[in-house]
Image (cartoon, grey):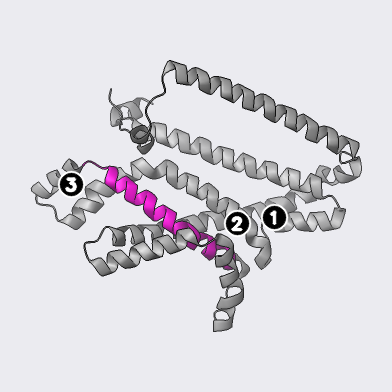
Amino acid sequence: MSKTPSIRDMLYEEPGPKTKKQIRVITLFAILLLAALLAVVIRQFYITGQFAPRYWYFFGRWTTWRFLGQGLLVTLEAAVTGSIIAFLLGFVLMRGKLQKNKIIRGASVCLIEFTRGVPTLLFIYFFFLVVPQTGWKLSAFWKITLPCAISACGVVAEALRSGVNAVPKGQSEAALSLGLTKTRTFYKVVFPQAIRFVIPSLIAELVIVLKDTTFAYIVTCADLMQNAKVLISNYDAMLSVYLVVALIYILINYLLNKLSDRLADRLKQNPAERSAA
């Protein structure tokens, strides 16, 4: 049965046997190199006494994990909220860039390039230092969520636009020939198919927003990184705390990537295959 091709399928050809063999060799070499580097790092940590019990004992306490869990919930809430806002803003910018009106299209292009070109950290400093001077008081949560959303909305807009452009023109032409208006054709026919193409890209952007929330310590938002800094201050254990926090981020990003892959595979199936699955 035929499957709906993704953007990845359109951009990249399936590698041949020789290329696959080269990929396996390079991957094996990279794994061995990373394993050797990890062994050197662990040995150095052992020599400098970083594995001493005084740097790790507090991880055996429930209060430590509850404290980190509270920060993790704030991090996830900020990431999800920021991603939703980024999607809504990106959708508006995408629609603007597809308009025939030159003024609307030009303004949308400028906003997309601006949000893509300015680092997230500058947006955070703007909301942290400049916005309060206008009299608009924001909580620490929104001082990190809004900048991350604005920074990501341009990328989301381009991802959505690529998905819309990937939908065959015959789909919209057929809908228009049946009497649907252009607006109904877009929302009923084109956009639902475009979403299927770009869901993996949108989840990848969620990972980026999640990582951008690590700047929350600047606005003293009690997220995972901020709580980690509190633990470091209390126990003088920088390496162990940052290592545990890094593993938490890696686990979350790994789960998001697996979710992206499963959604991509599921969306490639036709309705009959999905029902069977």
| Residue under the image location 44 percent in, 58 percent down | 153
What residue would you read off at disc 3?
Answer: 172
Residue 238 in view in this figure:
yes
Quarter of the image that includes the C terminus? top left
Amino acid residing under circle 1: Met
Residue 211 versus residue 167 in the image, above or below: below
**Looking at the magenta stretch, what is its main secondary structure?**
helix
Q: Position of residue 59 (x, y in %)?
A: 81, 44
Q: Tell me if I can see residue 62 in this picture.
A: no
Depth order, front residue of 30/42:
30
Give the residue pinned by disc 1: 225
Left or right: 188, with 25 as reference point: left
The residue nearer to you, when weighing 65 against 140, is 140
Quadrant where the N terminus is found in the figure: top left
- 62 lies left or right of 25: right
Q: Which badge, 2 or 1, comes first in the chain's sequence?
A: 2
The magenta span reads 143-168
* Residue 210 in the image: above or below residue 141: above
Label 2 and label 1: CA atoms lie apart by 9 Å
| Mark 3 or mark 2, earlier in chain | 3
Mark drawn on residue 254: none
Label 2–label 1 contact, CB within 8 A: yes
Nearer-the-camera pick, 191 or 124:
124
Rounded to the nearest whole Å, what is the CA distance between mark 3 and mark 2?
39 Å
Q: Residue 39: image x %, image y %?
A: 78, 29
Residue 28: horizontal and vertical position, in percent?
61, 22
- Residue type at mark 2: give it: Thr
Q: Is residue 187 left or right of residue 17?
A: left
Identify which amino acid the numbered label 3 is placed on.
Ser
Is residue 129 inside the magenta stretch?
no
Which element type, helix, strand or loop, lies under badge 1? Answer: helix
